[in-house]
Amino acid sequence: MRPSRRQIVALAAGLPLAMALPSAAWAQKKIVLGFSQVGAESEWRTANTESIKSAAKDAGIELKFSDAQQKQENQIKAIRAFIAQKVDVIAFSPVVETGWDNVLREAKAAKIPVVLTDRAVNTKDTSLYVTFMGSDFVEEGRKAGRWLVEKMKDQKGEVRIVELQGTVGSAPAIDRKKGFEEIIKADPKFKIVRSQTGDFTRAKGKEVMEAFLKAEGKNGINVLYAHNDDMAIGAIQAIEEAGLKPAKDITIISVDAVKGAFEAMMAGKLNVSVECSPLLGPQLMTAVKDIVAGKPVAKRIVTEEGIFPMETAAAEFPKRKY
Ligand code: AHR
């Protein structure tokens, strides 16, 4: 019997053997997707997990979901387990950028296509994954920087900035720093006086902000740039406990635009949040179906996002989905 077009495409693309099933059997087979999530460190991540789980359900895709609790070793173990289980597609949001080549080569050898969601990996061999879908984190950093430059354009003296970085080695922490610095370096009045990781969590954001305030004194900080809303919300508590007014005594910029950030903006405690959408589930399921069907998928799928200053928060809040 001559192979069908679908079978030829699948085999040529090095896709799973399941793709070589006769069309009738193939049509009945449920696609199995193994997804390794970073963890549950932030409001953003919770919304992202929810989006992936509900989109899989809606798309009729069987989801094997694994939570890595922010540890790369757990993600590597999960990916190996998915390979052993012969899932059709593996997707994951890599906690850090480097150190993935070996496990991705194992997936490739097993002919299991890999999709990166939300965060990228740093590898020379881009054939190790089919597509990367998610935000442009450098651009998010630039948006934060541009907003600050505009806000402080008439300020004469030094602008002393403290930065709460995300997880060390993660794509959003590296890129949001890079984009922000790229913009503010045009004017030497902007100075990042302290920069430390708060690991994307509220608890750490508060702890590190307390240390910043202690080190710089009550009047030594003009701006807080937090790589996500959760850390900014933790830092707001520290600022209030130090007897200062957040968003007034210290200008606060953060990233994500989750509901918690809108509540803080409406309470007058956060100046602006740059949007980073966690609602990647539907896009991911479309890509998974396309890959399994042998259709071409773009190597990079960028999420479109905005920026929300506090003045827009009340009008926007009812429309927010996360
Ligand atoms: O990778 C996206 C980032 O991870 C979000 O900005 C942050 O809140 C999350 O934990």
Image: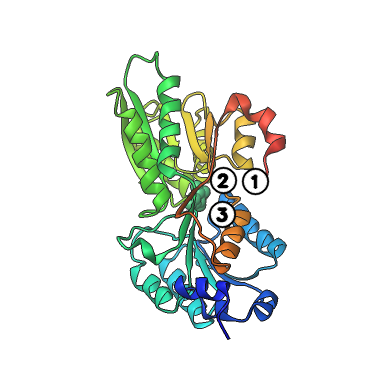
Residue 64 seen in render: yes
Looking at the picture, which amino acid does disc 2 mark? Ser
Q: Is mark 3 within 8 Å of ligand 1?
A: yes
Task: Pinpoint residue 127: horizontal percent, then vertical percent.
Answer: 37, 64
Precedes in sequence: disc 2 or disc 3: 3
Most extreme residue toward the left is: 188
Q: Nearer the viewer, residue 69 or 182?
A: 182
Q: Secondary structure at mark 3?
A: helix
Q: Residue at x 50, y 30 (%)?
A: 243
Q: Which residue does the numbered mark 3 point to in the structure image?
A: 45
Looking at the picture, which amino acid does disc 1 mark? Tyr
Q: Nearer the viewer, residue 47 or 248?
A: 47
Task: Pinpoint residue 38: horizontal percent, then vertical percent.
Answer: 50, 61
Q: Secondary structure at mark 2?
A: loop
Q: Which residue does the numbered mark 1 point to in the structure image?
A: 322
Looking at the picture, which amino acid does disc 3 mark? Arg
Residue 201 seen in render: no
Indicate the quadrant where residue 35 lies: bottom right
Q: Secondary structure at mark 1?
A: loop
Q: Is residue 239 left or right of residue 182?
A: right
Q: Nearer the viewer, residue 209 or 257?
A: 257
* Label ID, residue 277: 2
Marks 2 and 1 in Cβ contact (< 8 Å): yes
Precedes in sequence: disc 2 or disc 1: 2
Marks 2 and 1 sit apart, C-alpha to C-alpha, by 9 Å
